[in-house]
Image (cartoon, rainbow, N blue to C red):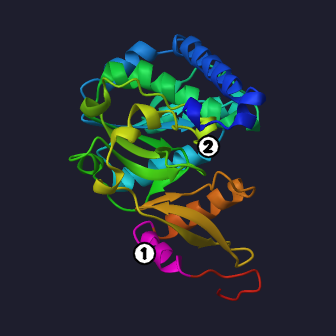
Amino acid sequence: MRALDDYSPADWLTAVPLTHRLRRLRNLLVDRIYRRRRAPGQEELVAHLSGREVLAFTVAFNMPEAVALLDAAMARHLPGTPLVVCDNSSRPEARAAIAALCAARGLAYCPLPPSPYHGARNGSRSHAVALNWILANLIRPAAPRVFALLDHDLIPLAPTDLSAQVARQPCYGMVRTASTGSAWYLWPGYSVFDYAAVKDLPLDFGTDTPLTLDTGGQNWSVLYRGLDRAALAWAETRTVYVTDPETGTDEPHLLADSWLHAGGAGHGWRDRALAHVRQAFEADPDGLLARLRASAGHRRSAAGVRT
């Protein structure tokens, strides 16, 4: 939250500090109520996960094809890292498809309680309460030595040692910064934590709108503000391009280290882009990373000209 002395006189005249704090209290209440809800098979799943060295959690949302691609890529490049699929889908048919996929592939599956948030405008809050539920009901009881949070449309293109990423620091991932001020946080679509280093902290993956921080931003005051950001290692990010096989145009995607954000969550062509990434991965799963890195400096326009 913003400090009270950060607000301008105009903010005080329009009660902006009060509005921000009331919204925060509302969000805390919703989180607290939601975390107490139970999921089918929750106790059995915790027992299955307990004692693991490393666990990766993904929040699935209405895209079984994204979960299938993430599983295929992890099976190839991180075969020793169990993937736990936590289903936050809003569509019953998507939940059924993801549950069937996980059963067929032997993936750990948790159908999250229905989200208290609905609609595109509440996507960040829905993701946040899902992550807080997972932390309280799966991660803390299972207590893995290392846990990772991955977007369902983020795929690894090379072997990754998640434990090594947090061997000398409490967390690792892709840094995102506030649009104003010095606050920052790790994108929960690609973040890794040393459980022993954070287990006693009141982690909260909620948004911090007053500080212009999206999902995970509440951990600025809990964890990140106390870290020397310059002294630690963080993910390297770049924009890379996957060619649309029908039009020949290059579609931009985020590459964080060797992890490709396949669906491009902010793109209107999400489903089509995911299909193109899947085609590229299936055609050359071991060589795709090098080609993407080579594409980072240029792209092809609709007219076929590299720019």
Q: Nearer the viewer, mark 1 or mark 2?
A: 2
Q: Say which residue label 2 marks.
A: 212
Q: Quadrant of residue 34 in the image?
A: top right
Q: Quadrant of residue 201 in the image?
A: top left
Q: Residue furthest bottom?
A: 305
Residue 218, relative to residue 261: is it above or below? above
Percent position (x, y) of residue 149?
A: 44, 40
- Residue 77 vs residue 163, the one in the foreground: 163
- Residue 294: say if magenta: yes
Percent position (x, y) of residue 182?
A: 49, 49
Q: Can residue 260 be seen?
A: yes
The three-letter code of the residue at mark 1 reads: Ala
Exactly how many numbered labels are in the figure? Answer: 2
Q: Which mark is residue 290?
A: 1
- Residue at horizontal 63 percent and vertical 64 percent from the top: 276
- Residue at horizontal 71 percent and vertical 86 percent from the top: 304
Majority secondary structure of magenta residues: helix
Secondary structure of the residue carrying tag 2 is loop
Residue 118, relative to residue 266: is it above or below? above
Secondary structure of the residue carrying tag 1 is helix
- Residue 141 vs residue 73, the one in the foreground: 141
Q: What span is in magenta?
A: 285-297
Residue 247, relative to residue 187: is it above or below? below
Q: Can residue 82 be seen?
A: no
Percent position (x, y) of residue 118?
A: 74, 28
Crowdedness near tag 2: few (<14), some (14–19) or many (≥20) residues, C-alpha within 10 Å? some
Q: Residue furthest left?
A: 168
Q: Quadrant of the C terminus?
A: bottom right
Residue 137, relative to residue 77: is it above or below? above
